[in-house]
Image: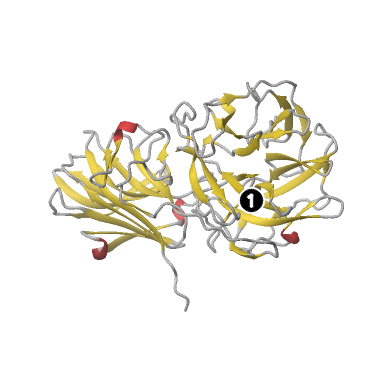
Amino acid sequence: MEYTNPIISGFYPDPSICRVDDWYYLVTSTFEYFPGVPLFKSKDLVHWQQIGHCLTRTSQLNLTKVRKSAGIFAPTIRHHHGRYYMVTTNIGKGGNFYVYTDDIHGEWSDPIWVNIGGIDPTLFFDKNGKTYIVTNEGTDAFFGHIVLAEIDIETGTLLTETKELWTGTGGAYVEAPHLYYRHGWYYLMVAEGGTSYGHMETIARSKSIWGPYESCPHNPIITHRESAGNPIQATGHGDLVEDNHGNWWFVFLGIRPTAEGWHHLGRETFLAPVTWTNDGWPVINEGREIDIHMTVERPFTEVILENEPSRDTFKSSNMKMYWNTIRNPQKANYQLNHEQGKLILTGTPVTLSEVDSPTFLGRRQKHFDCLAMTSVEPGTMKNGDEAGLTVFYSDEHHYEIAIVQCNNQRYLQIKKTVGDIFVVDYQEEIHMKEDQPIVLAVKGDKHHYAFGWGTSETSIQYVGTGRTQLISTEVAKGKFTGTYMGMYVVSHAETKVSFNWFDYQPIEKKLT
């Protein structure tokens, strides 16, 4: 079989996977974005279809004024006796909890909270009927050890004290634990080294779930920390799954930096084959580095699943699954008029630079080379109002091409926020009827964004640029998310602005 990494591109980090019959289900973390924890399904491990989110209600997910890259950390998905479980951490808003569903395409339960510290929890259902929870409940600044406790799965109550299982191999930030049982051994797999260029995955095993655990002699089982020339970096934080043919696979996060070492798309989801040594240790991709283009000698039946169209014409009665808001939305400010094909956003005084819930609807940038466009009907804007298209990484790092009302005049502006620096980089006065749509565009490549506008898709004139470097994770001080492209409105007068469609497309590069 041949496939291309990443298997899920854009900001989809910390993947966890389980298999139920012929289907695989995968979840990733979401931090300050709502809804939380996207849920995907696949039949071939390569082609994935989003089927929903695990956390879709405020009762499940409180993100009120959480700081950037807080909120929902790494989730784990597991299946047991016909029920699906997703366990995760809401940083600063309650800690560790899990939700469940008996219908993978349906709603998930309200949270069941667990009184255990640490992050990145996982559930393990043992063959003896007992259930365990594992976290990285460390006591030092580097999250130094993994702990285990038995749990009542009905209530979330701990049935035992926590016990330390392993401290890893010496890397910082020992986290992302997962437990497996295979051929009489309990395997404990963790991430170490931090989720950047020193990232790695290590594993240990024991005959007893309580330990002691012995470290794999060829740890780390995956890392690109000494592979500077590889286009994939920061590999680690993954999950194992066995397919119907008895073959094992590893889903994990990685990044695709530019040649200069900056990355802005976020941490993405990758796939690699796993084999086992004669003495029972896993080997990822036969010990070789992970490539963008992979060839694996295994049975493979391609099953391509249909995903939602890249252009949203807002003519459906439900929002597309790829849309997110920043923190919990004020639902009254998002009106979908599917009969007229309009998304009506009501502005508030909250800007994109505040740790709050601005009127914003965005989707992940999934490709270096891409084009995002939207058609805006500004309507009767008041002084101080703005509406437009943003390239958003965090409240401190974002670009906009916007329609701005100031001194009873209407302007087209390019705005840049980088740390504590804010500039209006371009401005021109525009003279158009209030009901005439304006098309705003952002075209990206590895190094730059170009910002343009026109009266139609075919009349776009590009009037400014911005560096991808300045909204990269490295410049944004090591946070955990990725770039979004989306619509927003700011207004002290609660002005309503209509968007007629939004389109996101990859740009195919011609070979020369």
Residue at position x 47%, y 32% from top? 66
Answer with left or right where residue 224 lies relative to residue 497: right
In the rendering, at what x and y percent does residue 277 appear? 83, 55
Q: Is residue 239 left or right of residue 338?
A: right
Tag 1 secondary structure: strand
Q: Can the viewer see residue 279 in this picture?
A: yes
Locate residue 403, reporting x and y percent. Answer: 24, 49
| The image quarter in which residue 7 lies | bottom right
Numbered-mark total = 1
How was the colour assigned to the protein in this rendering?
A: secondary structure
Q: Percent from the top left, x then y, of residue 471?
A: 45, 51
Tell me which amino acid carries mark 1: Val
Q: Name the residue under label 1.
A: 251
- Residue 397 in the image, given as x and y percentages of width and height: 42, 46
Please name whichever residue, 434 or 156, is drawn nearer the observer in this view of the structure. 156
Residue depicted at 75% across the width and 21% down the height: 160
Asked whether residue 292 appears in the rendered view, the answer is: no
- Other-residue count near label 1 (Cα within 10 Å), few / some / many at <14 / 14–19 / ≥20: many
Q: In which quarter of the image is the N terminus?
A: bottom right
Residue pictured at 76% horizontal, 37% vertical: 167
373 sits left or right of 114 in the view: left
Q: Which of 46 and 406 is in front in this view?
A: 46
Question: Looking at the picture, does residue 422 appear above or below residue 347?
Answer: below
Report the residue at 71% width, 29% height from top.
131
Q: On screen, 479 above or below 508?
A: above
